Amino acid sequence: MQSPWTVKDLQRLNGRLVALSRFLARSGDRCLPFFKALKDPRNFQRTSECEEALKKMKRHLASLPRLASVFPGEKLGLYLAASPRAVSSVLVKESSGPQLPIYYVSHVLSGPEERYPPIEKLALALVLSARKLRPYFQAHSVEVITDQPLRQVLTKFDVAGRLLRWAVELSEHDISYVPRTAIKAQAVADFVAELAQMDGDPGQTPEAWTLHVDGSANSRGAGAGLVLLAPDGRSFKRSLRFGFKATNNEAEYEALLAGLRLALEMQINGGYEAWDATMAKYLARVRDLSARFPYFTLSNVPREENGRADALAKRASRQAPEAGPRIEELPARTIEVATTAPGGPPTTWVQELLRFKRDETLPLDEVAARRLRRTHAWYAEESGRLYKRSFTHPLLRCLEPDEARTVLAETHEGACGEHIGGRTLAHKILRQGYYWPTMCQDAKAYVQWCGSCQQHSRAPRQPSVPLCPIDCAWPFAQWGLDILGPFPPALGQRKYIIVGVDYFTKWVEAEPLATITEHQVEKFVWKNLVTRFGLPKTIITDNGPQFTGTRFREFCAGHSIQLRFSSVAHPQMNGLAEVTNRSILDDLKRRVSAARSTWTDELPSVLWSLRTTPKTATGESPYSLTFGTEAVLPPEAAVATLRTWSYEEEASNQGLRANLNMLEERRADAHLKALSHQRAIARIYNRKVRPRPIKLGDLVLRRAEVSDPTRTKGKLAPKWEGPYRVTDVVRPGTYRLTAMDGAPLPRTWNIQNLKKFFV
């Protein structure tokens, strides 16, 4: 590699170095002389500084470290470095031997970045590393290894501007901060050593406090002694007596933890080892607390050199009190206090965040701990309370579960509440300045369980269960009965029509009645159905007293006829009869004008029209499916057709007999067409289904319109009444109910008139 003589040579050299930047530690600092020379290309001159930088770069390129690859799930480490003119980082991985570098990142500071404080330069290096190495940060947990209080700066309560933006940007990654101890790789050691050389004099090192701790355990008890020495010579002594049995190792750890807490109130070398599960918890607790110190070293000294702490520990382990410093009681192990004790109150999300903010206590669950480290930058503590930073408000007060329930109740149904919906309720609480993680979900649940909201809510319009078509494979085996009226009184004071419809052929039978009684219904069934078409297998009716009475039930039972009733206020179950009623009513309205009492005279014409009109479902008229041929209509007599002007009696009789022989085939084709038509309607209907599952034993509300169809209770009456309990599921969407006192409700109820009640 030759020295650049022209601007073009220098630009070519910079391009090559940029391409190799991944493999070059602190490439920004090394290339600064080249960048300065390119700032003024017209007055380009070779300087001794550029020559020296090129020589160093050649020596560095001759001894490049070996870069490692990573595997899924590995935890990575990140070393940061900052100089007055550049920031750099190196991503490393742990191996069985030394740490192996993966990627080098470097950035030359420009403009205002050069005036950042040193700690903000390190934060900038972390942010730039997360941006450039985003795939690594998204797929792996990253430990930032630094001897600076970087974590405290990025989670400080009163930070603003770029530090707040950086903290939010880094919160999406699983980043943790650990103190820098011994460096296990030569490449990383060189990286950090070069930082010290380039930074020059780092400044005066803060004076250190010295902590002496010792633990003592014997048959009479256990205790700990602490001596904290300030740089100015002051000493703070404390004795702890344990309210539990402890081994020597546990006593040592408890002493160390108490000393760390004492040091934190006034303002650790990794020689401790964990030999069992209890010791591992102690070691994790020590590491959590030690991370709060910018500089921490732990040393093991002989007992004779730790006399004051040893004397305090022995004094605390004795049961008899002695003169001297006050002995404090430690009722339980620190590792038990840090987590929720069995049978104790559960730790809330606010308490977890406050403990993490105060002493770096993490939940034992790894997933919860990772989530807490990722999101804690959004929260801050002020006056013992937890607040969350917001996009719409400066701070949001974080609520405990009990406080959240109080705010929900007051906002939803208090003096200023109006029983609003769940999402609106959550937004209103947020605008008032409160927050908890599940507020939207809790608001929807609260509204769902509100008794007043349930009784006054709107009835669902979408169907709740799929359509169940009624199939009939044989003519005149299944009939639907219904009552139509009242009409204007006609001859004989007749003002009702009893209608019967065959589910296969769609044949209609109807007769005007003066009164609706069981005797009239029985007479109609015998005269118009049984004697003309034979005994039916099934008759479907509504829940009118003329159908549910004892006399009609006994009549059907005596002739082996199954009597089925539709659900209360659900006429769709006998839909064919309802549609036929509508057709008869519409046709009568058009035929009867001024003399409305003559509707009985027009009824036979209406029935004749319905019987001879082809139906969409079967493609045939009821008349043709009943008698095997089409009827001769009055227009054919007025205007001759082929079959009327060429009529021959013998040929006609033979044709009618042939049609009767083929009648079964026509009925079979009509049945297939009807099934296809029902499936097409079911597909369209089922697209709108919104399931509302109701199970056996659930509490439900019933539509008030069923028991009060005229709305006599007024406009302010609730739309739903109850609750009632489901005691039987007749079929999907059809239920039997009982009142809360155990009294059964008569007849069955459809899900369209029911609503699940939440208590």
Image (spheres, helix red, strand yellow):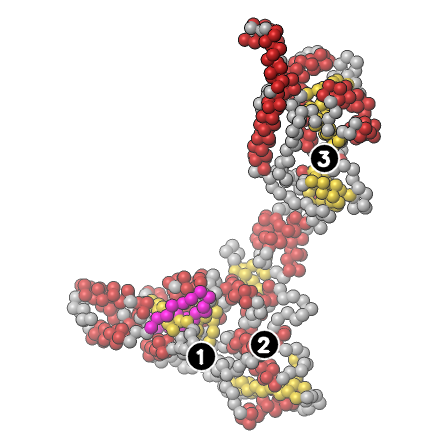
**Residue furthest out toward the bottom:** 304
Secondary structure of the residue carrying numbered label 2 = helix
Q: Are marks 3 and 1 in contact (CB under 8 Å)?
A: no
The mark found on residue 277 in the picture is 2
Amino acid type at mark 1: Thr
Up-down: is 382 above or below 459? below
Disc 3: which residue:
567
Is residue 99 found left or right of 556 in the rendered image? left
Disc 1: which residue:
181
User: Which range is magenta?
Assistant: 66-91
Nearer to us of marks 3 and 1 is 3
**Which numbered disc flags the more N-terminal residue, 1 or 2?**
1
Nearer to us of marks 1 and 2 is 2
**Residues at marks 1 and 2, CA–CA distance in whole angstroms:** 24 Å
Disc 2: CA contacts within 10 A as few (<14), some (14-19) or many (>=20): few
Q: Residue at 59% of width from left, 23% of height from top?
A: 665
Disc 3: CA contacts within 10 A as few (<14), some (14-19) or many (>=20): many
Amino acid type at mark 3: Ser
Q: Residue at 59% of width from left, 90% of height from top?
A: 310
